[in-house]
Image (cartoon, rainbow, N blue to C red):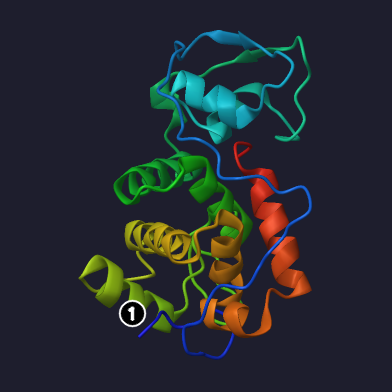
Amino acid sequence: GGPPPRRAPPAPPRAAAALRVRGARGAAPPAPRPTGAAGSTHRVRRGDTLGAIARRYGTSIEAIVRANGLRDRNSIVVGASLRIPSRGAAAGPGSSVARLLDEASARHGVSAPLARAVAWQESRFRQSAVSSAGAVGVMQLMPATARWIGAALLGRPVERRRVADNIEAGVAYIAYLRRRTGSTERALAAYYQGPGSVSRNGPSPKTLAYVASVMSAVGRV
């Protein structure tokens, strides 16, 4: 059988519903290898984002934010000089989650920027996050979904309260939904609403807003 829903009753597998998201774009390309030297400075150029700068220098967004005392991670000034912390200084809760997301993305063939964007939208990278419906962790996994992913995709039990398991399962689920639907946007809709519900009812307005929000965060977190 197919995966259980995250937020809707189950339904027999059917063809994915058509989904159009205004302003959404396809999955970002895989993150490039670091090309800059950590422990240096970077002058902000037009089109730069903190996510792209962090990947270039092999550090994390959180480390750059802390090193420069930035209040708004989504607003950096062209021409400003950012201090790039050493790789050792990047070790913190956010950076460890980002590393696990990147590693799981590589294993399962998912765009790392996309996986990060989903995790940011779901929990702001917080393993301590628990929803009113009982979804847990960085990737906000429900109990039945975690059990299905473990049995059907990973071949082992998933402990959703363990951060590495939670991230591995969530990224594997994104990869599965992307294969099943053939579309990043439809995969995100199914991740949020449940594949059966999307197939039966189409994406809800909340689902469309979720997809647009995730896509807007790709490459920025």
Residue 65 picture location, percent across and down:
63, 30
Q: Is residue 158 visible?
A: no
Disc 1 on helix, strand or loop? helix
The reply, left or right, for residue 151 in relation to residue 10 is left
**Residue where numbered disc 1 is placed:** 147
On the rendered image, what quadrant is the C terminus found in?
top right
Q: Position of residue 77 (x, y in %)?
A: 78, 19
Q: Quadrant of residue 66?
A: top right
The quarter of the image holding the N terminus is bottom left
> Is 205 above or below relative to 88?
below
The picture places residue 27, in percent across and down from the top left corner, at: 55, 44
Q: Residues within 10 Å of mark 1 (few under 14, many from 20)?
A: many
Quarter of image, res 145: bottom left
Q: 4 or 87: nearer the eye?
A: 4
* Camera-side residue of 139 and 26: 26
Q: Residue at x 61, y 42 (%)?
A: 218
Q: Is residue 60 above or below residue 107?
A: above
Marks counted in the figure total 1
Vertical placement of 21 versus 48: above or below?
Answer: below
* Tag 1: amino acid: Arg
Residue under the image location 71 percent in, 21 percent down: 47
Q: What x and y, as percent, mark residue 112?
A: 46, 42
Residue 193 appears in view: yes
Please tell me which residue is depicted at 77% across the width and 15% down the height of the picture. 78
Residue most extreme to the left: 155
Please tell me in which quadrant of the rendered image residue 81 appears.
top right
| Residue occupying image coordinates x 47% and y 72% | 141
77 lies left or right of 68? right
